[in-house]
Amino acid sequence: MMRAERLRITGGTVYDPANGVASVVGDVCIEDGKVVTELPTGAPRLDASGMIVMPGGVDIHSHIAGSSVNHGRQLQPEEHAVDPVPAPRLDDPDGEGGQPTRSGTGGTIPSTFTTGYRYAGLGYTTAMEAAVAPLFARHAHAELDDTPIIDAGLFALLGNDEYLFRQIAAGEGARARDYAAWVLRAAGAYAIKVVNPGGVELWKRGAPPRNVTGLDDPVGSTAVTPRRILETLTNAGNELGLPHPVHIHCNALGQPGNAATTLETMQTLAGRRAHFTHLQFHSYGGGRDKGWQSGAKDVIEYVNAHPEVSVDVGQVMFGPATTLTADAPVGYLLHASSGRKWVNVDVELETGCGIVPYVYKEKAAVAALQWAVGLELFLLATDPWRVVLSTDHPNGGSFLSYPELIRLLMDRAYRDEQIKRVNAKLLKGSALADGLAREYTLNEIAIITRAGPARLLGLTEKGHLGPGADADVTIYAQGGDAATMFATPRYVLKGGTLVVEEGQLRRAPAGRRLAVRPEYDDAVLPDLKRYFDQYASVSFENYPCAGSV
Amino acid sequence: MSAEQVVEHVTCLGCGCACDDIAPLVRQNRIVEARNACPLGRAWFGDGTVPQEARVGAHTVSLEAALTHAATILTQARRPLVYLAAELSCETQRAAVGIADRLRAVLDSATSEIAAAVLAAQRRGRVAATLGELRQRADLVVFWGVDPAERYPRYTSRYAVAPGGLQAPIRTVVAVDVGGHRGPGDADARVIISADVEVDALGVMRAIARGHALPDVPALRPAVELARRMMQARYVALVHDAEPDGTPADPDRAEGLIALAQALNGPTRCALSTLRAGGNRSGADAVVTWQTGFPCAVDFGRGYPSYRPHDGAAALVARREIDATLVIGLPGSVPESVARGLASVATVAIGPFASAAAFEPAVAVDTGVAGIHEGGMAFRMDDVPLPLRPSVAGPPAAAVVVGELATRLVSP
Amino acid sequence: MSDQVVLTLRAPLAHRLEADAIVPDRFPALGARAIAALPVWYSGRPAALGDFFTVTGERSERVLVQGDLAWAVGLGAGMVGGELVIEGAAGRDAGAAMAGGVIEIRGTAGDNAGGALPGASRGMTGGEIVIRGTAGVDTGARMRRGLIAVTGDAGQGTGRGMIAGTVVIFGAAGSGTGRWIKRGSIVSFGALVRPASFRYACTYRPPHIRLLLRYLATRHSLPVTESQIAGRYHRYSGDLAELGKGEILEWAGA
């Protein structure tokens, strides 16, 4: 059975929350890569009796391809040397299933081919590369071309963009929107990303304060502040009707007391659709002189009460990680405090990049707090459709740790055991330490790992199993704990192709690229060309990726 | 088609500056003039004529026959080497790494020649900036033992020194002469450091950036003064050549530069600008890294990538461990340390001027030059990816020929 | 069980033999056949240890390797215990990133003995390496803990970037020895050119050196003299480009 033109998955227990199906035994019919309502009786069958059937996983925020990711890869031969990955043996390497497979290396930043195989092996069939400087978009696309199986899109960094700042300073909201649309097309991107608005620009300016401290700090001009940047880009995203609203990495990442900044940011954008990413890194109480504590409760209560807001958690998992961010001043602070190796790249007119390898240790007080804050966000959230599972791979941990995270959410006894192992110094008074009884159901897991992120991304053909959906399906065998179940799906279909069978990778077709093509008024172009001629080191004509504008 | 046309916004790979404002004037499929190009760029474009031949030994054969013979040589090899030479697009490099993976070959590039610097960056990381960012920010540009005028002619006029930037600072240029490696002649200030204390100087400068006091050493006074000057700048561009000519540098030099640039980010901001030659060498590092996890000197012998930076192509060829080599790219760009061993190995050369390779390959297939005859993507020295726009028609594209060869290789 | 396992090289090596399977702490559990079947890589291709060595003895954590092993890479790399004696030259990466146990090299040591693997923040984190001969470049680079003693000359960059631990060099030290150490001690009895970012601290008779040298004399039979044991040492602290908490101790005679 190769790429089945038709396939009936029979007898499985189906979780398809987008269509209100939870734990219902039934068939899923597939034809030409899509889910259909019915098939003729003679169609080939895949017996999923006793197994769990879900849509393929959708990762709303991950760092898997592009210039920053590749700097992080090149920086760490030591983690690749200890995680070699021979080329998977496919049953039909040269057949319809795709190209011959490739060897590679793993670690927190696997090689591209390995990234694709490992996502598929985990039952994930879609992933978003969450931070690409438009200047480097061409590179990110080339890496995605070498990342098989998964469908992928990329988010374009705009929160520290000089041309955007100029439009804000001039009060040119419409032109800012047109520019954002042009950049999305030029970069072949899927969504607008904001990282530490204004803060990265101040880091690059090379004089104190080297970061913003509040939403109203001036960034060059007093008319340009984090608040204005956030409002401008949030409005732009919503006015352009993008499938995914602006994707926000708030100011003050990783600093004690930053929950206040996060809440102020959310309040600023109240009533407007916005996605707040890796919320865990932005939900700390305390303060510079008061030390660290959890601020998760206040932040998630706001999220619970505001349906226009969505988040992903950015859970920290114990073990090796690579902090890899456009928030370059954070990279410097981590390097200075940890003494670990450090990459910084200042990217002209657009953004920055900071990379520091890191290890989260159970016995470290701050790491334990971060771990607890993430779990609190999950466990105190009331609407799973707006709270997505992520580790901000590889910042909080590898995507390979998702199954372990799912077990922590589903199994209170296991979770309580783990809590006993961690440094409790900063956990006093936290909701988690006080005991949270909640256990996620399988249906809720299906929401936070596929149905929810697909809906938040506006991917109407992903994350569900209704007619017309892409035939991205993951089938798990029951038995054992949740971590084991989710780590080793028995079958994975991608666009109707059986990529994993009996837990083994069998086929590795190329994935598709997800991108938006918003309309814009091309009156912006002459001014933009002048700006390029004056400041950019790349020709205006060479900036867009091929065929994108 | 008109007799004469100008191709606009062409990226030049004559050096790592990858200027993308070149406008070749083309007449009858010949480049008459590479407008905007520097002398190095004009030499790189030439008139666009390249040989177009496929050969087995001394005999001209069809492309088909050459590739079939090449496949036989490579699949029968016990210990093959795939060597990524210069003048390839990233697309060709990607296909070439795939061939090395299939053959369980050793894969290497000229980057191994500067393995000590690569390893230093893997120990320390690095602080960098795109060339356009230096232009926006730097108020102090320090050329450490390099005058870009020679090997990177438009570096100062396009990027680091001449053009105004956002913060339009008054730029000060300091030339540091390290032994025979001199900084620009027209710098605002000049610092002279003897080559034998270069690494010491870098260490002492870093100690100062970290606020540590040191005893006075007369030979190091200029370095100490320079360090203080750098700390007072707002944004320092520290420029060095990753591939300096002449005597091999102290292996600790690269680490000293990296660590100094990092330490200066305490008291001020600093970026290390690393000059590299052209032909998309930087692209090879990026591609090999994303496909294998390592930038060069990769051994696929175990069926997966192993990193062997201390035992790269030059060492393997010298001790005759390699029994067949596939050189992809311009043969003339293969470093002497590797090339001199190739004459005694069955070698397949695919790339521009392959048929003219000095090491007399067993099979040679001429292709076009990436950026002159072929499109695709290439990296500037600062890892900015740029599109390549062909100006003239040429031999079969390297990406196509390498792809064809790949289909003829059976997995071992 | 035998007193020791002896591995004798059958024929000279022409190519690189990746021999990081020779890790003595693993051998107590292995019979002679299992030892002979240990995986090695020769010229990039898989092979077995027994293809290259005759194996005498079994199930012992003392391993003696005989022959010119200049092409054998990674002997004892990552070992956590036991004793590995190499009668002959050793290739690069011997004892790299080891955590415990003892390696004795009775011959020339290749580069990076007790050092760090590419990109790794730490070299050896414990144990001892005694080199009765000349050591290569980067000996003990980035070591975190442990002891290395070299009876002959040591190569360029010995102890480079040490985090802690001790390197004793009886011969001449290569250029850049001690450069960029954070903590740790380099003890030198021969010529040594200090990096300029070290600062003279004092001249004294360090008690810890006395203990260290007596230990080397009794445990490893190194020819340490009384004038070395009781002698005066110039202490230079550094590297001030880093933390500055390390030291170079130069013997100043009795």
Image: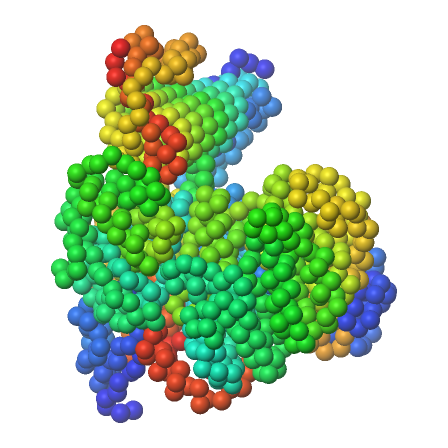
Quarter location, residue C250 = top left
Residue drawn 58% across the image and 67% down it: A248
Q: Residue at x 54, y 81 (%)?
A: A517
> On the rendered structure, is B300 left or right of B356?
right
Q: Count up the numbered dots.
A: 0
**Percent coordinates x, y for residue A82 in the rendering:** 52, 43
Residue C14: x %, y % from top left: 34, 34
B340 horizontally vs B412: left or right: left
Is there any visible trace of residue C238 in the rendered image?
A: yes
Judge by depth and name the residue closer to the eye, B207 or C63: B207
Tell me which residue sits at (35%, 27%) in the image.
C247
User: x and y percent of residue A461 in the render?
Assistant: 68, 75
A128 up-or-down from C204: above or below: below
Is B50 positioned to the left or the right of B77 in the image?
A: left
Quarter of the view holding residue A366: top right
Q: Nearer the viewer, residue A179 or C217?
A: A179
B48 relative to A209, above or below: below
Q: Is residue B360 above or below residue A548?
A: above
Question: Is B393 or B382 nearer to us in this picture?
Answer: B382
